Image: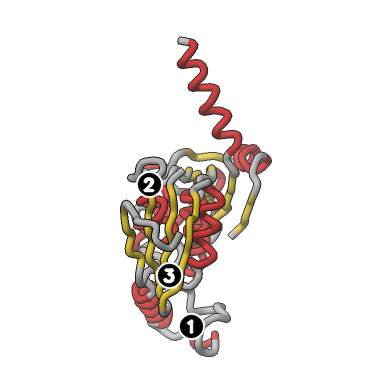
Amino acid sequence: MGDTKPDETLDCRGLMCPMPVLKTKQAIEKLEPGQVLEVITTDSGSKVDIPAWAKSTGNELLSMKDEEGVHKFYIRKK
Amino acid sequence: MAQEVKAVVEEAEKKKQKKRIVIICSKGTLDMVYPPFILATTAAAMDFDVHMYFTFWGMDVLNKKKVDNLKIAAVGNPGMPMPTILGILPGMTNMATWMMKKQIKQGGFPEIKELIKTAKEGGVKFHACEPTMNVMGIKKEELIDEVDDIIGAAAYLELASEADITLFV
């Protein structure tokens, strides 16, 4: 799943809780169902928060990865 | 027509399925206003039905004149990096407020005004406390436009009785 090509990218680097989740919600609303959003964060709390948000809203978290303190999430809109 | 009825029923069902959180906001200092707003905006992003009930000093957040001047209390705040007695010195409250605002900005946190806007965009309902307005002599005209209604304890309890989460801050 690491090769998923995102339709849109949201850069939340430098933002703290709750901003990454709030911005992810706003960004996913602009997509069509089935499209994939890439979210990039540096807030370590987002590693738990974004999966929790995805679970609660029913959007599918395809994958997540860590690259030297930068977290990337791939979410498919339901 | 049948289509419309179906749509209304579906909408009602959807609302029923939503989780509900009701937060009582009773304080008007910065450190006690951020937590309920962070939770409310996040809950809205998670598709919860979100209600904030502002009472006593929490009403300062809904007050046009006060919302931009919320401070942090330097006196009696054990979290301050100094003996709390020093908080009574002139200028301490303003200094603590300035420090916290600086930290908020550095942390990439939004300002309260922005959180109010985000909350409203996410469908968060703002309820003003009627008894507080009577006791403190606050008029409806003094409240920010984002307030949805002015309600009392019974209406709050009605909302809270169907809630999945209730918090008092």
The residue to which callout 1 is attached is B88
Q: Give coordinates of residue A16: x percent, y percent.
A: 42, 69
Q: Nearer the viewer, mark 3 or mark 2?
A: 2
Q: Amino acid at mark 1?
A: Ile
What residue lies at 45% left-to-right and 10% top-to-bottom?
A: B1
The local secondary structure at tag 1 comes to helix
The residue to which callout 3 is attached is A71
Q: Nearer the viewer, mark 1 or mark 2?
A: 2
Q: Amino acid at mark 3?
A: His
Q: Is residue B149 visible?
A: yes
Q: Is residue B51 above or below residue B78?
A: above
Q: Nearer the viewer, mark 1 or mark 3?
A: 3
Q: Give coordinates of residue A21: x percent, y percent.
A: 44, 58
Q: Amino acid at mark 2?
A: Gln
The local secondary structure at tag 3 comes to strand
Chain assignment, label 3: A
Q: Give coordinates of residue B68: x percent, y percent.
A: 34, 61
Q: Quadrant location of the N terminus of chain A?
A: bottom left
The local secondary structure at tag 2 comes to loop
Chain assignment, label 1: B
Q: Residues within 10 Å of mark 2 (few under 14, many from 20)?
A: some
What residue lies at 40% left-to-right and 65% top-to-bottom?
A: B70
Callout 3 touching callout 2 (CB < 8 Å)? no
